[in-house]
Image (cartoon, helix red, strand yellow):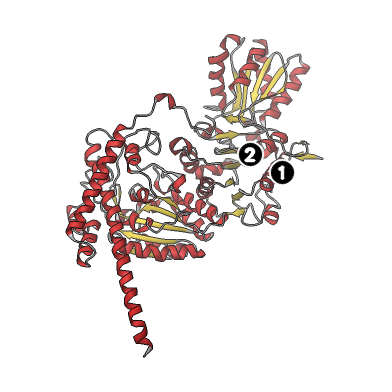
Amino acid sequence: MSTTYLEAIREGLWEEMERDPNVFLLGEDIGIYGGAFKVTAGFFEHFGQKRVVDTPISEAAIAGAAIGAGLMGLRPVAEMQFADFISCGFDQIVNFAAKCRYRWNAAVPIVIRAPSGGGIHGGPFHSQNPEMWFVKTPGLKVVAPATAYDAKGLIKSAIRDNDPVIFLEHKALYRRIKEDLPAGDYTVPIGKAKVVREGRDLTIVTYGAMAWVALEAADTLAGEGVSAEVVDLRTLLPLDRETVCESVKKTSKVLLLHEDTRTAGIAGELAISITESVFEYLDGPIVRVTAPDTPVPYSPPLETAFLPNADKVIEKARWLFRY
Amino acid sequence: MSATQATRPERKKKVAKAAAEQAELAHKCLYYMSLMREVEDRIERKLYRQGKIVGGVYVGRGQEAIPVGTALLAEPDDVLFPSHRDMAVFFIRGVPLGRILAQYMGRVDGLTRGRDGNMHMGDMSRNIVSIISALAATVPVAAGAAMALRYQGKNGVAFSYFGDGATSRGDWHEGVNLATVQKLPVLFICNNNQYAYSTPLSAQMACANVADRGPAYNMPAEIVDGNDVLAVHEATKRAVAHVRSGKGPYLLECKTFRMTGHSAHDAAHYVPQGLFDEWGKLDPITQLEAKMVKNGWADQEELDRVHSRVRSEVDEAVAWAEQSPYPDPSTLLDGVYENQ
């Protein structure tokens, strides 16, 4: 039976809660209501209010309480109702959670789930991609799965990890994609990118919902005789530069794609990493397709113009191929 | 023989026992308060000025009764969140003096191995959680630790310390609200020293007391003389009993005064001299000593012995800390993550 991206996250959470009594959930409206997106529907009834904690609308308290419980040896999974609201708990995450281990050798084994991304007409405060706020913070791990398989495997790895993990789940993928998942327990390692489509002529490096845009573009490009390889980063921090660079060595051309806004997006970090490591393999400039430097607009024509899509990728890829 | 006659010797014994316990408690308090005063004097007035401590120094001079009177009631399962003016919490939980001094001097034997300075330190083996610079940030973390204590079936209490200034922060309110709505075992301890850096309380909040914030959260709140260690101890007993019995958080506001600037580089010209003079007369250590002599719990000679013991312990600890090496720069990258 096929499992959606949302169901995969739910299964991962459920199985980890069954496996480890120290795992518990906290967040806004996650209990009786089952969460704004229903990721935790049924958890309250099964696991009870001790392990599924409905909190006040207090992102700093949610993040802070997760840290406190984590320091005491529990494995809290906190939900931010929308990734956009994570800014209200920013200090707790970047100054408290991220720095405990380095400063005083204290483990903060917490997961902060954050439904991110656009394409659902959510407007400026329900559509953002806040990953780079955290990728700039040593001590955190930042995960952004694109597939149901990876979503389940990565949420499990995140829960078992002894460092704080920001788990970005893309809202537009929740019910849009599904696949058959293997029966039984499996994990996907944090910090490992994956080549999701092999190609010869150029590499598209991306993550999250844009992995699907890259694959769609690669299909069209294949019809034009352009063989595109697609690398799904899956984790943004720590960043798997090796897999990216290996792919660039093979194809010699690279297009960086992200839904996040342009300036200081992960493309910038990847570009310099590629230049530092495999410059001599490059046969063309490193190019990028990203959202522009604006807030995420609400109205459909504006949001469509804002988001990268297959056409924008194809156009840039053609140019790069011909270079 | 009447019942009254029968119990009289019993009662007498009880009174004598209570007096002996008070005397013993007073001695314990005097030791820890004097130790904190001596260590912080050494840090602020000697090691900092000698350039042996290169970063910020924030002391709790005049506020020693608060960490001592409260933390002496902490059980092993309790978890403590001392503020930057609560050094005695570390002594009471058994952190060696030398390691605290090494922390200030940026040496490898400090609790953060040179990664952080001053009171920014913690030790989960002793259930002490480190502050970060944004001071109210520990308040929701304390709520989470209390959640864990309850989750784990322990009868522990989270001791959440903060100053008056911290109560202006949003995460203070979020943390207190979460703790009260969830009836979590948190004891909130405010050292109200009347200044947040240079800002007096009157410019910090519209209510007269931090305790006035309690009713908004349906939380019992009590004001205690923060310069009277035995009063702080007594109030803490009440507060801890409330919290440990599962009735939810309790706010203890300890009124005191910051007898220094915000930090060692701050001469505090903005504080009227009259306030220093007035509060100087209420010094918690001098007050306790007077009480001990008056009640016959100690004579001057005994008090002098405490101070000379404290001085030699601190001498020894400073020497030990100065022998501790600086961290090796090759360790710079270690420990950002578990496997790095």
Residue tagged 1: A11
Q: Say whether disc 2 or disc 1 marks the residue closer to the N-terminus.
A: 1
On the image, the x and y values in percent for residue B308 come to 21, 49
Alpha carbons under labels 2 and 1: distance apart? 34 Å
What chain does badge 1 belong to? A
Which residue occupies 20% across, 63% down?
B293
Amino acid carrying mark 1 in the image: Glu
Determine the residue located farthest toward the bottom in the rendered image: B1
Residue tagged 2: A299
| Residue B114 image-quadrant placement | top left
Which residue occupies 63% across, 51% down?
A30
Q: How many marks?
A: 2
> Could you tell whether A22 is left or right of B76 in the image?
right
Q: Nearer the viewer, mark 2 or mark 1?
A: 1
Q: Is residue A189 visible?
A: yes
Amino acid carrying mark 2 in the image: Ser
Which numbered dot is residue A210? Answer: none
On the image, the x and y values in percent for residue A290 come to 60, 26
On the image, the x and y values in percent for residue A125 come to 57, 42
Q: Residues within 10 Å of mark 2 (few under 14, many from 20)?
A: few
As helix, strand or loop, the secondary structure at mark 2 comes to: loop
What chain does badge 2 belong to? A
Determine the residue located farthest toward the right in the rendered image: A1
| Residue A193 image-quadrant placement | top right
| Residue B49 image-quadrant placement | top left
